[in-house]
Amino acid sequence: MFTDLNGNKIFILGANYWPSSSGLNMWSEWNPEEIEDDIKRMKSLKINVCRFFLYMPDFMPTFDNVDSTMIERLEKFLEICEKHEMYSFPSFFVGHMSGEDWDVSWRNGRNFLTDPDMIKAMKYYITEIVNSTKYFKYIIGWLLSNEIPNYVGQQDPEIIANWTKDIIETVKKLDSKRPVSIGDGAWTPEINSEYDRWKFQLRKLNKYQDFVGLHYYPRVISPWQHTYTTAFRLKMAQEWGKPVLVEEFGTSTVSCSEENQAHYYRSVFYSSLINNSIGVMGWCFNDFDFEDKRPYSHHAFEDRFGIVKTDKSIKPVGNEFIEFKKVIDELYSDNYQKVENNVGLLIPSNYYYKYPYQFKPEFDKWYGFYLESFSLMKNAAIDVECVIEPAIELNNENDLQPKEKLDPKKLPLLFAPRLKIFTKNYWRKIVDYIKKGGNLYCSFAVDSWVIDWHKLVGVEMDCKFGVPDFRDTDHLEITVIKDWGKFGKDEMFTIPIQNDNPEESYCSILTTDAEIIMKDQYGDPFLIKNKVGKGYVYFTPYPIEMLSLVNNDDSWKDNLVKIYRSIYNEIYKNLDFKICSNGLEMGIWKTSDSKKYKLIILNHSWNKNEGVLHIKNRNYECSSTTNFKQINENQICFELDRKGVVVFNLMKIISDNKSLG
């Protein structure tokens, strides 16, 4: 989406910026020499984009005045960026920053989004800023705000959408060439699920903004949920039709070691690349060390998010920018194209859309549930894309809808963990997809609203209305009936279960005509495979993803990952490249002539990880950024340190054994 001045594609590798000496008071405590030193330091780390902030109380001290001194300083800042060829994102309304709201003194309680005088003032402010600066070549785009949901509070989604449309149109009239985004962090129900809390909605806002900017700082118990948050949020946001930038992420070295900050950045960098982000921007460039300056006095951990310390030494994370930029340059210089072998994770529309009088379940943390399911799939080395059900819009809002993806030729396998609820029309489309040759994996959900689900999976069930079924045990002993996928005949494993929530109950099965792959200690099916038209349905009568979510012991989850991987391998039988180790994420790129491939593999684990790369065809010369062992003509073994990365370069060999250059 973004290009340089010569029209070449750019992957944004950026940093959010405040100077170390002043923080939020950058404009009132003006120090252009320090700023220029910082920009030069960014360039030395291969950072190509700086996101900076127009602190609104400084720029607009009164209702009808934009401070000319601040405009001059802004122009000087952009001159420095221009001098050093640093692209930038100015952010207009700040607003909110680092754990505190910073209001203009003249607002006097007016509604920021609806009050006519506020709108008039905003448009005047934007006009002054854009007209003064749009001639600077290295402004790469405009951002309306920084995390404006915090600043404006709970507002009606229609009001938010109308404000967004109005303000973006104002910017576009002044500068039609540059892209504009909101800067809201994409805190939306389409990603986070909680529609009663999140009122900024992608289905409304993406009609007006040119790209989506993610902000996230995950704090979870599961290290897998933590590390796959980047991929999950990217995939959820991408379904709404606009490119997605990881606009803000990071970690304070108050909360972790400097080395682990670097590991975290590396994992976000490469997972973003593998999952089709248009760029990444760390929070933030500098550390701070203030005696008594808000917000740092009450959010003291904000002092240590930097890449650069206050003594101007660079933390280990700085080297991650340099190394990552080398990989980006190689991909872009040879015009590599991404190869996708995806599986769809089905997300029902009630995840993000509130239907009337829908029964509220006892458990409603669906963001965590689908992130857990996504993480299990990723641990199985599956390429995942989210397939989001369109909502039945009951009030004719004319909102955007997610992409239609139920095509078995393009997406041959879907996962539906907890088969609980789909709209009737969409469920018919899923059934039709299977009959035409698509494949579905699903797990049981108590009190399902899906019509005839038991017929589709091939069972006669003994479910009771309002009374969940539980096993009188705290674990299942599973036996594999025959050699299948990654499992051998008579192989056994154990799954812990819980009996204190209906969502953890199982489906009592009377009979089945489906193929039984695994059974439990009671002799009942644990995993079955049912032929439906030209496709197949895999079904487990236990809510295994829910059980995985509520259990923090990862040791037994390897068997769930093996089940996922076995299903994936049955559908994708002839992949050119596969990895078979838990916690490894692989991206595949190839040149347009298919003579060269680049495989980037990231270890998401906090431990060392041994990987095996399977190569279908033998006619490749292989080099790599780390040592590897050729097991045989089709297998390569390698080892990665925690959060480590390896890049494999493969070149086809012609019949006379001369490489194709």
Image (tube, rainbow, N blue to C red):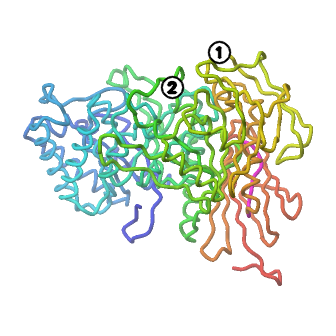
In this rendering, position of residue 177 left or right of residue 604: left
Query: Among all residues in the image, which is located at the extreme bottom?
Result: 656
The crowding category of the residue bearing disc 1, from other C-alpha atoms within 10 Å (few below 14, some 14 to 19, many at least 20), is few
Residue 146 numbered mark, or none: none
- Which corner quadrant of the image does residue 648 belong to? bottom right
Which of 616/11 is in front?
A: 616
Name the residue: 42% across, 23% down. 300
Instruction: Locate residue 36, reporting x and y percent.
Output: 35, 50
How busy is the neighbourhood of tag 2: few (under 14 within 10 Å), some, or many (20 plus)? few
Q: Amino acid at mark 1?
A: Asp
Q: Is residue 595 above or below residue 203?
A: below
State the SS at label 1: loop
Q: Residue 171 in the image: x percent, y percent?
A: 21, 53
Q: Quadrant of the N terminus?
A: bottom left
Q: Is residue 657 visible?
A: yes
* In magenta segment, residue 632: no
Which numbered marker is on residue 364?
A: 2
Of 257 and 420, the residue lying toward us: 420
Q: In this figure, which residue is indicated by the disc labeled 1?
A: 500
Nearer to the camera, 502 or 367:
502
**Is the C terminus in the top left, top right, bottom left or bottom right quadrant?**
bottom right
Distance from Cα at disc 1 to Cα at disc 2: 15 Å
Q: Residue at x 56, y 52 (%)?
A: 275
| Magenta span | 576-582
Q: Regarding mark 2 in the picture, which secondary structure is present there?
A: loop
Say if the magenta span includes residue 580: yes
Percent coordinates x, y for residue 129 in the rendering: 18, 50
Q: How many marks?
A: 2
Earlier in the chain: of badge 1 and badge 2, it is 2
Q: Label 2 near label 1: C-beta < 8 Å?
A: no
Q: Is residue 135 left or right of residue 320?
A: left
Residue that appears at 91% across and 42% down: 489
